[in-house]
Image (cartoon, rainbow, N blue to C red):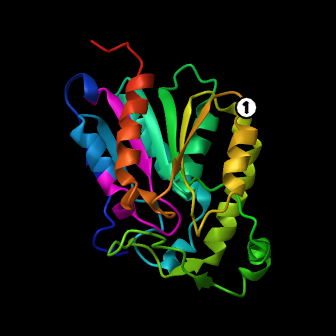
Amino acid sequence: MLIVEGAEPFAADGDGAAGRTGVLISHGFTGTPQSMRPWAEHLAAQGYTVRLPRLPGHGTTWQEMNRTTWTDWYAEIRRAYEELAERCDTVFACGLSMGGTLVTRLAENLAGQPSSKLAGLVLVNVAYGTMRKDASLARYLAWAVRSRPGIGSDIKKPGTAELSYDRTPLRAFVSMQAMWRLTIADLGKITVPILYFHSVEDHVVDPLSGKLLHAGATSTTVREVSLHDSYHVATVDNDAELIFTGTVEFIAEHTRTGVRD
């Protein structure tokens, strides 16, 4: 399947001490690495080792995405984490929207493992659920209705667009809902610190997700930063620099001191 131009994954290997810190970044549902690339490039410029994968079914066609499930997307995130863990002493995982759900699930699965190198999560407008009534009907409609209108490019900054599908593949959406349920149930397992960026005005993810995060992540700390000049895709919006610099500060604060020979 041909990948849409601009949807390619991004990787950078850092040098020296900074390069021994790895950063995994995940884009969101129906999106592509394009919306996360400025964030990834900023972190790479700081010397970190960075991986920004393209999730299966994304950056091609929404019809192909309907043939993938959340376990396919998560497997790619886990693969990227394992690659970073092989190269680095410490790994941080970052995600936008459903990308935040995927890295949250990663933290849940790694919790309690002595070999885990995960040191923190950075979440931007993370999605764990929705209060929209039509979403509860998706599992009943998915076999007859293949897609709904797209949710991409919720961006306040003029002249900026997200590379994403113009249709929402419904079967894939139902699969994401299944991941939401599992992730919510295990939020209490997370022990690594969380930095949570939240747009005050978001037309894709409603306030339920933030409430679920604060209520469920009881075994760690959640530091919330409000974004007042961005919509959902804040990583390419007016508050992008706040996210980028805040991430660097968070990494510096929580990076482990031990280094390999």
Image height of 260 relative to 238, above or below? above
Residue bearing mark 1: 218
Q: Nearer the viewer, residue 186 or 154?
A: 154
Farthest-out residue, bottom: 144
Residue 254 horizontal/vertical position (percent): 45, 24
Image quadrant in which the C terminus is located: top left
In the displayed structure image, the side of residue 85 where residue 47 appears, left or right: left
In the displayed structure image, the side of residue 169 where residue 77 appears, left or right: left
Q: Which residues are magenta?
A: 19-38
The residue sitting at 48% across, 68% down in the picture is 57
Image height of 41 relative to 48, above or below? below
Residue 160 horizontal/vertical position (percent): 34, 72
Residue 45 horizontal/vertical position (percent): 22, 41
The residue sitting at 57% across, 63% down in the picture is 201
Residue 58 lies within the magenta run: no
Image quadrant in which the N terminus is located: bottom left
Q: Nearer the viewer, residue 45 or 57?
A: 45
The residue sitting at 57% across, 64% down in the picture is 202
* Local SS, label 1: loop
Farthest-out residue, front: 228
Quadrant of res 222: top right
Q: Nearer the viewer, residue 186 or 125?
A: 125
Quadrant of res 85: top left
The residue sitting at 58% across, 84% down in the picture is 149
Residue 36 seen by the camera: yes
Image height of 254 relative to 200, above or below? above
Quadrant of res 24: top left
Image height of 95 relative to 204, above or below? above
Assess disc 1: are there few (<14), some (14-19) or many (≥20) residues with their C-alpha within 10 Å of its C-alpha.
some
Residue 53 horizontal/vertical position (percent): 39, 53
Residue 83 seen by the camera: no
Q: Nearer the viewer, residue 28 or 80?
A: 28
